[in-house]
Structures are given as structure tokens and as C-alpha cells.
Image: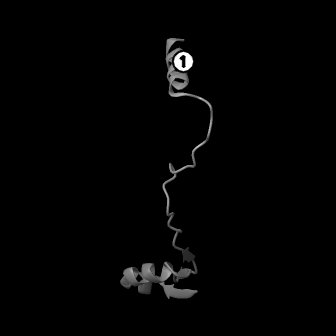
Amino acid sequence: MKVFTYSEARQNFSKILHIARKEEVEIRRKDGTVFSLVSKREKDTSPFDVPGVKTKVTTQDILRAVRESRAG
């Protein structure tokens, strides 16, 4: 883990973000406050990319259900 002062972090923010991609970075202020900077993991897939489900439901069944739900 790398540790930087607040002033160092401000002056080298791009560098700090680059380091945070690989490891945790702490930023310490004069008043003793400590902040931790950690990169979030990038997801390789969309949250909408879900596996399909095999059913015996047809397109007509789905359309009928939608029509019925709108009629009520």
C-alpha cells in the first residue's frame, strides 16, 4: 500500500489513480484524517447479459399475457 500526503495527492492525482488501479492508496491530511483509494473492478459483461431460460412458452403465449395485463 502506498501512502501520500494530501498535498502530494493533489499534485500527482493522475499518478495516484494509476497506482490505485493495482493497489490500495492512502491519502493522509495534516489533521490526521485518512482516506483510502481503491479501484473498482471492471466488469467484463453488461448487467443485462443474462443466460437464457429454456421454456415451452411461445411468443404467442407472451403476447397474449401482455394483452390480458393491459386490458384489466
Q: Which of these two is toward me, 46 or 29? A: 46
Number of marks in the rendered image: 1
Indicate the secondary structure of the residue bearing disc 1: helix
Identify the residue shown where x is 53% and y is 81%: 25
Q: Which of these two is toward me, 72 or 57? A: 57
What type is the residue that disc 1 sits on? Ser
Q: Which of these two is toward me, 11 or 24? A: 24
Identify the residue shown where x is 58% and y is 86%: 1
The residue to which callout 1 is attached is: 69
Note whether 49 is above or below 13 in the view shown: above
Q: Quadrant of the C terminus?
A: top right
Q: Quadrant of residue 15?
A: bottom left
Residue 23, image x, y percentages? 55, 82
Residue 10, image x, y percentages? 39, 81
Q: Which of these two is toward me, 32 or 51? A: 51
Residue 3, image x, y percentages? 54, 87
Identify the residue shown where x is 49% and y is 22%: 63
